[in-house]
Amino acid sequence: MTLNLVLVEPQIPQNTGNIARTCSVTGARLHIVKPMGFEVDDKKLKRAGLDYWHLLDITYYENWEDFRAKNPGPFYYFTTKGRKAHSDVRYPDGAYLVFGREDAGLPEELLKENPEDCVRIPMRSEVRSLNLSNSVAIGVYEALRQWGYPELEQKGHLARLCWDEDAE
């Protein structure tokens, strides 16, 4: 199964690096829509992704129109303005989870055109929003949970000792 993560005009390299790491460990594809608020070779970006960059499937797009022309959807727009919870949606194979800029979110025109595809991560009303990389992780793991965590190791092992079942 394929899960696609879309960052529209990301501004903070550490967030994008953390999201790249999340994509690397889950197998999700990362799509970055320009312009970005940093250079791809930014040391903070690389440091946040650590040594997982070789596992990352990433594509860059010049703008939103370029991205839409090359990707069929379905799209799910994560926004604090959404009217239904992210966990109330059933994400199909090939879903695109779309996240906006850290400082502005997604354009309201885009949200207004796609009201049924706008989802919100529940949070207290007096707080503006979650950190972008945290929001992405929540969205990714909800979709993967629904799919039964395909191709992900679900059982860990102790480094120096053995769980009882490891000895068998």
Image: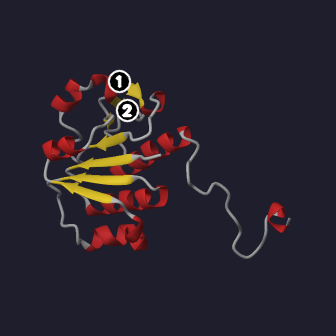
Identify the residue at image location x=37%, y=67%.
48
Q: Are marks 2 and 1 in contact (CB under 8 Å)?
A: yes
Q: Amino acid at mark 2?
A: Arg
Percent position of residue 116, x then y? 32, 23
Mark 2: few/some/many CA within 10 Å (<14, 14-19, 20+): some
Picture residue at 29% right of the left edge, 43% below the top: 99
Q: CA distance from mark 2 to mark 1?
A: 7 Å
Q: Which mark is residue 83?
A: 1
Q: Quadrant of residue 15?
A: bottom left
Residue at screen point 56% across, 54% down: 151
Question: Residue 112, image x and y in percent?
Answer: 21, 25
| Vertical order, 155 against 119 (above or below) | below
Q: Is residue 21 above or below residue 104?
A: below
Position of 58 relative to 124 (above/below): below
Residue of label 2: 120
- Relative to residue 133, is residue 108 depicted above or below? above
Q: Residue at x 47, y 30 (%)?
A: 90
User: Residue 42 placed where, x, y %?
Assistant: 23, 71
Residue 12, horizontal then vertical, whole percent: 25, 58
Q: Quadrant of the C terminus?
A: bottom right
Q: Amino acid at mark 1?
A: Arg
Element type where label 1 sits in the image:
loop
- Of residues 59 and 36, which is closer to you in this image? 59
